[in-house]
Amino acid sequence: MEGYRLSRDKVFWLTLLMSAFFLSLTLWFKFTMDQSLCNYSAWVWKRYHEPPYVGVWDLSFPGIFILHRAVIAVFGRSFFGFRLFDALVQLGSVAMIYNLARRLFGNRAAGFLAGVFYSIYYADLGSLETGEREGFILSLMLLSVALGLRLKDRVWMRATLTGFLLGFAFLLKPTYGLCWLVFGVWFLSEGIRSRARMVWVEMSVYAFFCLLPSGLVVLYYFHLGHLQDLYQ
C-alpha cells in the first residue's frame, strides 16, 4: 500500500488492543516444572555467581537461563514479572504477524485475524506451554523476517542482526539452528542476483554472527574454568 504507515493504521492498534486482552489472561499463570527450574538456576547464577550446570544442573541449552536471568534483572524474581515479560514478547509477535500477513495478502483484515487468532491460541496453551522456548524462538524468527524485509538494502546490518538473533535462537533450542540455512538461502538468492561479487562476504558476516552467541557462552565458561561443566 503506497504511503502506508503502521503507526496510523487503526486496525493495527485494534489488533494489538484485542490481543493484549487475550494475552493478559496469561498473567495469572504460575510456574510449571521447566520454568521453575530455569528461573531457580538463573537466580542461583545471579545470587551466588554459579552459572547453569555448575550451581544447578539441567539439560537445557544456555539460552533459556540467559533469558531468565535478564528477566530477573529487569522485572524481578516473581511469577508475575516473568509472565508480564512473556506477554509483552508475544504482543510483539502479534505486531509482526499482523504486518507480515498484511504485506502478504494485501489487506488489513488478514493481519487482524492472524494476530488476534495467534493471541487466542497462545493464551489457550495454558501455564505448562506458555513462557517456554518455542514462544520466544518464534518471536526471534518473526523479528528476523521483519528485519530481513526491512533491511534488504542494508545488507551488512541485516546479516549482523538476523545472524545474532538466530544465533540466540540456537542457544534456546539447537534444532532451530536449521533456521540459519533457511535465512542463508534467502539472503544468498537475493545477493547473487544483485551483488554477486560481495554476496559471499555478506554470507561470511551472517555466519559469524550466527555463531557469535554460542562462542560468547563458550568463552564465558572457559574464563570461569567451567568449560567441562558446559560440555557435560
Image: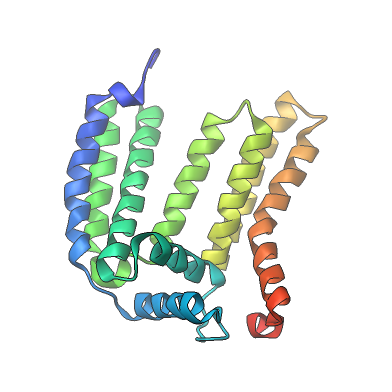
Query: Which residue in the rendered view is the most extreme toward the top?
Result: 2
Quick check: 41 left or right of 156? left
Residue 111 lies, in percent from the top left, at 30, 34
Work out whether residue 169 or residue 125 is closer to the camera in this orientation and state it.
169
- Disc tally is 0
Residue 16 lies, in percent from the top left, at 24, 39
Residue 73 lies, in percent from the top left, at 42, 64
Work out whether residue 211 or residue 55 is closer to the camera in this orientation and state it.
55
Who's the residue at 57% across and 53% down the image?
166
Quick check: 43 left or right of 183? left
Residue 63 lies, in percent from the top left, at 53, 66
Q: Quadrant of residue 188?
A: top right
Which quadrant is the C terminus positioned in?
bottom right
Query: Which residue in the rendered view is the most extreme toward the right?
Result: 197
Q: Quadrant of residue 130?
A: bottom left
Quick check: 81 left or right of 18? right
79 w.r.t. 8: above or below = below
Which quadrant is the N terminus positioned in?
top left
